[in-house]
Amino acid sequence: MPGTVLVTVGSTQFDKLVAAASSPSLQHILASYGYSHLTIQHGKSPVSSTTTSTTNSTSHESGLQVNTYTYKSSLREDMEQADLIISHAGSGSILEALRLNKKLIVVVNEDLMDNHQQELGDVLHEQHYLVCCTVSTLEKSLQAKEYESLEPFPQPDTTRFSNFLDARMGF
């Protein structure tokens, strides 16, 4: 049974994603799917008045245990504990979640100029490694439950580079 959802904005400011994660409607969807804990790493973005930035605050409307914080030196522990990760579309956050084989919904920040995040999200979505959406389609993406049938991300082949060098050197 699912337990924990992690929402992360990394080191960026992504007010719209934090507001969406703090919203009663999104929290009700998560609770209806059996999630009991929601952790929001909000960075520089403010948290809503319904979700305080105190550790272990409870959202009375949804029944979710909601924890929020600005930053940690590493999100790895939170990612490892999460059953579902909803992340900004930063390549570092995406790669870390995929290497941990987590269900991942990536939310593209449409307010960024020259949006390379959309390109990365779209390619990985087409390969069924993650679900890519925007803040305005996040609830719909959750309700579609496409994240339940994602492909595992391939582990890195650590021999490729050494094999390449060996071939170049004639070994």
Image (spheres, rainbow, N blue to C red):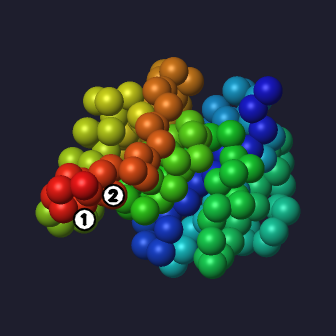
Q: Position of residue 10 (x, y in %)?
A: 50, 68
Q: Which residue is mark 2?
A: 162
Q: Secondary structure at mark 2?
A: helix
- Residue 114 appears in view: yes
The residue sitting at 85% across, 62% down in the picture is 56
The residue sitting at 47% across, 42% down in the picture is 155
State the residue in front, 17 or 77: 77
Decide: few, some or many residues near mark 2? Use Cα within 10 Å; few <14, some 14-19, many ≥20. Answer: few
The residue sitting at 78% across, 47% down in the picture is 37
The amino acid beneath tag 2 is Ser
Q: Judge from the rendering whether residue 138 lies leftward or rightward of residue 36; answer left or right.
A: left
The amino acid beneath tag 1 is Leu
The residue sitting at 79% across, 27% down in the picture is 1
Q: Judge from the rendering whether residue 69 lies leftward or rightward of residue 42; answer left or right.
A: right
Q: Which residue is mark 1?
A: 112
- Residue 27 appears in view: no
Q: Position of residue 50 (x, y in %)?
A: 70, 59
